[in-house]
Amino acid sequence: MGKLADLRLLAVAEMIRHGSVVADIGADHGRLICYLVEEGIAVQGYACDIGERPLATCAKTVARRGLQNKIELRLTDGLKGLPLGKIDDIIIAGIGGDVITRILEAAPQAKDSRLRFILQPMTRPERLRKSLYRMGYAIERERGVEAGGFVYTVMKVLYTGEIKNVDELFALTGLLPGDDGAPSRKLMFLTARRLKKAAESLAGARGYEEKVWRYGALSSAIDKMLREED
């Protein structure tokens, strides 16, 4: 039985509901979906990728671990062609937040409150959060994870049908303030520092006064959240 050493992927796995049928979108090497099945977290899996080469690599992993009868390989673009009625949890991890948004936008059939989406954006999580709520999704749980010298966020998302325009502070932090883990706090700290540096770089530049004020106010608001948690 293969173990999963990647802390980022382990954080994703931890949010999967036990006994579920799982689809891993962009399965790549296939280690995550194999781990979920081997550990009994998933009773069945779909390993999906848009590229033939990564899917071939995934197929070798599945075969080497003898899981051909429990993991089905799918060459697919996002969620297209997947039997969503047979699937419980959907993983979209290791790609940019904008790409995750486009995958969900292209799949109106996935707007089903029964499903759970485990999303792990590599970039632009703030834009993903805004897009999720505009599409009627909501974040059910969120936590930070540190791996390979970087800090990422992992979200468990469901469809509620309630369309919202979230404010900028929520877009930047999501549910991270409610998680007391060190990676969540570090991610908030890094976000505040990035905003502060952006404000400092624009200070004195003509026409950017409002942006400088806004960045500074958001940075201060996140710093206040962190102090209140101490």
Image (spheres, helix red, strand yellow):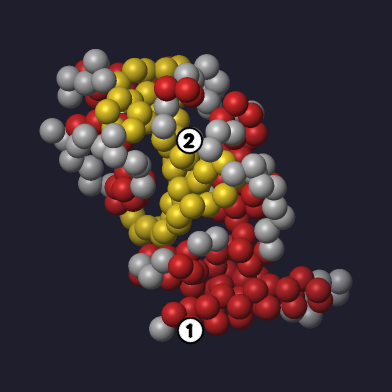
The secondary element bearing badge 1 is classed as helix
Q: Residues within 10 Å of mark 1 (few under 14, many from 20)?
A: few
Q: Can you tell which quarter of the image residue 229 is in?
A: bottom left
Residue 182 pos. (x, y %)? 36, 69
The secondary element bearing badge 2 is classed as loop
Decide if residue 28 is on the left or right side of residue 208: left
> Does 30 appear above or below 198?
above
Foreground of the two, 140 or 90: 140
> Does 17 appear above or below 146?
above
- One can see residue 146 in this view: yes
Q: Which residue is mark 2?
A: 115
Decide if residue 162 is on the left or right side of residue 48: right
Q: Residue at x 46, y 39 (%)?
A: 116
Quarter of the N terminus within the rendering: top left
Quarter of the C terminus within the rendering: bottom left
Amino acid, disc 1:
Arg
Q: Can you name the residue that lies furthest to the left here?
A: 1
Q: Can you tell which quarter of the image residue 28 is in?
A: top left
